[in-house]
């Protein structure tokens, strides 16, 4: 994208944020100095317990306003998933259409061919209301996601978390939750070949979630350390 395109894109995002916060603004909003709510990005292997820990925290959290960022996905829904919490499940043609028009601040393709997109408008809407939790996928996505969020607004504070649990538990969970047998086998082989107890990249927090409630409790303590109640606009 050329400099003119980048300038127009930034202007569009400033406009959207002001539009979404105008209902409760008491003074003129300067996006360049605004103290944004925080984004928590949760990374880990497929089946490592990311969703379970996040769901447990959101169900038990009563103090801080939080929203869950929902990714745009090309894979089919798994049993028990829905489009409100699990993902926006779209055909690849629509995914490519959104990608080509700059709707995603980050997107990637997994080893099994599924594609994941992170919608800029969705992030702007959620961050205008409170703190945000999003799934980051594998640790290889860390640099791209950080750049992507900063391309939306460079003063959004971000906390990164890596969640893991024993390889045997991950493999059992992948097989249990069902889906296309060929895709299950790809995920199993990936974990067999790539799993390690600690990530190579640096994350702000590491959570060992062998026992779900212990993982949720650790996540809650981490949020308490990093969070402040949303500030008035």
Image (spheres, grey):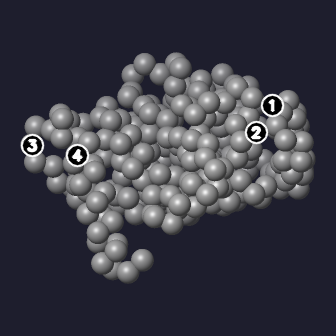
x%, y% of residue 7? Answer: 29, 72
Disc on the earlier residue, 2 or 4 = 4
Tag 4 residue: 19
Disc on the earlier residue, 3 or 2 = 3
Residue depicted at 54% across the width and 31% down the height: 84
x%, y% of residue 193? Answer: 88, 56
Residue depicted at 59% across the width and 27% down the height: 55
Residue depicted at 49% across the width and 35% down the height: 68
Q: Secondary structure at mark 4?
A: helix
Q: CA distance from mark 2 to mark 4?
A: 38 Å
Tag 2 residue: 47
Quadrant for the C terminus in the image: top left
Tag 1 residue: 177
Disc on the earlier residue, 4 or 1 = 4
In the rendered image, is residue 113 in sight?
A: yes
| Front-most of residues 62 and 205 | 62
Query: Disc count in the image?
Result: 4
Q: Nearer the viewer, mark 3 or mark 4?
A: 4
Instruction: Give left or right: position of 169 versus 83.
Output: right
Tag 3 residue: 27
Q: Quadrant of residue 54?
A: top right
Disc on the earlier residue, 1 or 3 = 3
Q: Secondary structure at mark 3?
A: loop
């Amino acid at each position: 994208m050329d400099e003119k395109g980048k300038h127009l894109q930034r202007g569009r995002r400033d406009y959207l944020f002001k539009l979404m916060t105008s209902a409760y603004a008491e003074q003129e909003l300067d996006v360049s100095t605004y103290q944004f709510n925080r984004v928590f990005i949760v990374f880990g292997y497929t089946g490592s317990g990311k969703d379970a820990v996040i769901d447990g925290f959101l169900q038990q959290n009563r103090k801080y306003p939080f929203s869950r960022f929902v990714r745009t996905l090309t894979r089919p829904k798994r049993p028990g998933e829905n489009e409100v919490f699990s993902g926006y499940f779209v055909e690849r043609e629509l995914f490519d259409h959104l990608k080509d028009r700059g709707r995603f601040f980050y997107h990637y393709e997994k080893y099994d061919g599924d594609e994941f997109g992170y919608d800029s408008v969705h992030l702007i809407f959620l961050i205008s209301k409170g703190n945000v939790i999003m799934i980051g996928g594998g640790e290889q996505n860390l640099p791209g996601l950080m750049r992507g969020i900063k391309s939306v607004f460079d003063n959004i504070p971000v906390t990164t978390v890596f969640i893991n649990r024993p390889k045997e538990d991950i493999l059992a969970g992948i097989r249990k939750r069902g889906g296309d047998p060929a895709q299950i086998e790809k995920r199993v082989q990936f974990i067999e070949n790539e799993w390690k107890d600690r990530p190579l990249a640096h994350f702000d927090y590491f959570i060992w979630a062998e026992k779900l409630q212990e993982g949720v409790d650790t996540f809650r303590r981490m949020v308490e350390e990093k969070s402040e109640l949303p500030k008035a606009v």
